[in-house]
Amino acid sequence: MILPIALEERSYDVVIEPGCLARAGELLHLHRRALIVTDSGVPQAYAEAVAAQCDNPTVVTIPMGERSKNLDTWTLLLQTMLDHRFTRSDCVIAVGGGVVGDLAGFAASAYMRGVDFYNIPTTVLSQVDSSIGGKTGVDFSGVKNIVGAFYQPKRVLIDPQTLATLAPRQIRNGLAEAIKMAACFDKDLFSRLELSGPAVPTAVVIEGALAVKKQVVEQDERERGLRKALNFGHTLGHGIESLGLDLYHGECVSLGMLPMCSDAVRPRLRAVLQAFGLPVTCSFDVNAAYEAIVHDKKSDASGVDVVMVEQLGSFQIRHVPTRSLLEKLEQIREDAI
Ligand code: GLY
């Protein structure tokens, strides 16, 4: 299946096909230098399979995890391209999850003011969300994703077979982002998740989420309005994530969505999250999470924009006083006690 993303001269195709990683040589233009970026948590065989299809590959494997998403790693990628005499006609390929895609895409955006970027996401999270839409960047000075660029890939290859090597918790982690999209944009997909729970095939959830992502990115590439809804659950979620607890990004988003729902939506969303094995309560330092949200440059003196879901399949953006988030964080913690 091919999902076209229509963005005028920045348009590209998302190829969704079992085994397409092994066909990268046919599907991408690889007769040139290629920097392949992967991480230590991704089976090395994936990057090797892509490298074997390139005329002139250089593979960089970064340590897995959010800690690699910084300017030092970004500099390493740029230095590697320079050392290997990359020109503006060469390309960068991400093989891995969201951290790898964000970093590699940002390096591609900057080297010689932009070289071609291909993304081969290998986690549910990156396949349903982060690989599409051109958000690239790094964390800086303790603030997530604060330095970066909108830089669309030239093509995205989604090979569902790569999910076979993921731990079940990693799969659940990515499904949280798909549940988020269903809650904000697709009440039919939400009902399906509600009725059948994890019995819904992962491929169906991925395709449903990608259909949402396509619509959103095509209408609001630069996040002026509609795309902000994809941050549902992320304001509180990032606050909790910054505490360095043993929680994945999607698990923090799961926690962060519940206080941002109406009383009618909350029990239904909680039931779906629980059915998919995602956390709905957590013990944590509310004040520390709040300080992290305040430190995040997305809030200003007058308050912060948050996404609320009052009816499933729709959303509202509300500007709320930052202090009101303390109470929302408390709700997540209180329920855990
Ligand atoms: N992951 C949220 C977005 O692409 O806007």
Image (cartoon, rainbow, N blue to C red):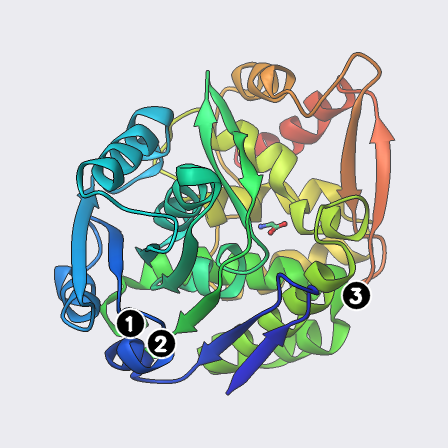
Q: Is residue 201 above or below residue 289?
A: below
Residue 290, by quadrant, is top right
Q: Position of residue 237 (x, y in %)?
A: 56, 37
Residue depicted at 45% across the width and 65% down the height? 127
Question: What residue does disc 1 label?
Answer: 162
Q: Nearer the viewer, mark 3 or mark 1?
A: 1
**Amino acid type of the residue that numbered disc 2 sits on in the rendered structure:** Asp
**Amino acid type of the residue that numbered disc 1 sits on in the rendered structure:** Thr
Q: Is residue 86 above or below residue 322?
A: below
For mark 2, give the secondary structure: loop
Asked whether the residues under the numbered discs 2 and 1 touch, taking CB atoms below 8 Å apart as contact, a structural biologist would say yes
Q: Nearer the viewer, residue 75 or 255?
A: 75
**Amino acid type of the residue that numbered disc 3 sits on in the rendered structure:** Gly
Q: CA distance from mark 2 to mark 1?
A: 6 Å
- In-image side of 84 versus 121 (left or right): left
Residue depicted at 40% across the width and 72% down the height? 157
For mark 1, give the secondary structure: helix
Asked whether the residues under the numbered discs 3 and 1 touch, taking CB atoms below 8 Å apart as contact, a structural biologist would say no
Label placed on residue 313? 3
Residue 21, by quadrant, is bottom left
For mark 3, give the secondary structure: loop
Q: Position of residue 221 (x, y in %)?
A: 70, 53
Q: Position of residue 288 (x, y in %)?
A: 52, 15
Q: Earlier in the sequence, mark 2 or mark 3?
A: 2
Q: Is residue 282 above or below residue 273?
A: above
Res. 268 in view: no
Q: Earlier in the sequence, mark 3 or mark 1?
A: 1
Question: What residue does disc 2 label?
Answer: 159
Q: CA distance from mark 2 to mark 3?
A: 28 Å
- In-image side of 260 versus 24 (left or right): right
Res. 327 in view: yes
